[in-house]
Amino acid sequence: MPAATPSDFSLTIDHRAATPPFEQLRTGIRDAIVSGSLAAGGRLPTVRTLAASTGVAVNTVARAYRELETDALIETRGRLGSFVAATGSPVHREMQAAARAYANRAAALGVAPSEAAALVAAALGLRP
């Protein structure tokens, strides 16, 4: 299976930044998955390949991959490598779950759907 990193996708690590390299890797890959730059089911570079291309230690990449796997963004298939999770955006799934929980709680409190929606709009800074 081809690598999930198209030619226009690359990660650059700023070694002078206050943000640790593993976090730069994690957020860079996460953002690429959420934006669709890395397709669901696509194979990610090996830990060693990504470490070499970004100039970080192998353990740094491994930590980023572990955290991405914990967040259900990627899945590791043993010796086959790591792949972008094919289950859709975990951010979208989490937001849907939060919205369902909010709607259920509003209903349990007897809040009308229009009022609950207005409260969410206000919290998001949206104007009616």
Image (spheres, rainbow, N blue to C red):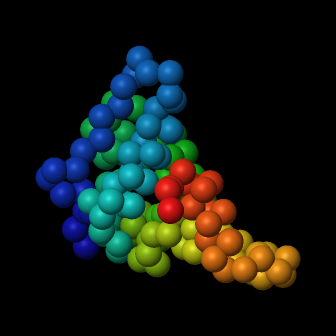
Towards the viewer: 78 or 124: 124
Task: Please state the horizontal and vertical placement of residue 90, each as a whole percent of the image.
Answer: 52, 68
Towards the viewer: 37 or 74: 37
| Residue shown at 62% from the left, 54% from the top | 123
Q: Residue furthest left?
A: 7
Task: Give the tally of numbered discs.
Answer: 0
Q: Residue furthest front?
A: 128
Dividing the picture into quarters, in which one does residue 63 lie? top right
| Residue shown at 50% from the left, 69% from the top | 92
Q: Is residue 103 visible?
A: yes
Q: Is residue 115 above or below residue 66?
A: below
Q: In this view, does 33 lie to the left or right of 125?
A: left
Q: Is residue 15 above or below residue 85?
A: above
| Residue shown at 72% from the left, 80% from the top | 112
Q: Is residue 78 visible?
A: no
Dividing the picture into quarters, in which one does residue 121 lie? bottom right
Q: Residue furthest right?
A: 109
Task: Please state the horizontal and vertical placement of residue 80, each as a whole percent of the image.
Answer: 39, 69
Query: In what quadrant of the picture does the N terminus appear?
Result: bottom left
Task: Please state the horizontal and vertical placement of residue 15, each as a whole percent of the image.
Answer: 40, 22
| Residue shown at 46% from the left, 78% from the top | 87
Task: Please state the horizontal and vertical placement of residue 17, each as a whole percent of the image.
Answer: 44, 21
Towards the viewer: 7 or 44: 7
Q: In this view, does 90 lie to the left or right of 81?
A: right
Q: Is residue 32 above or below residue 72?
A: above
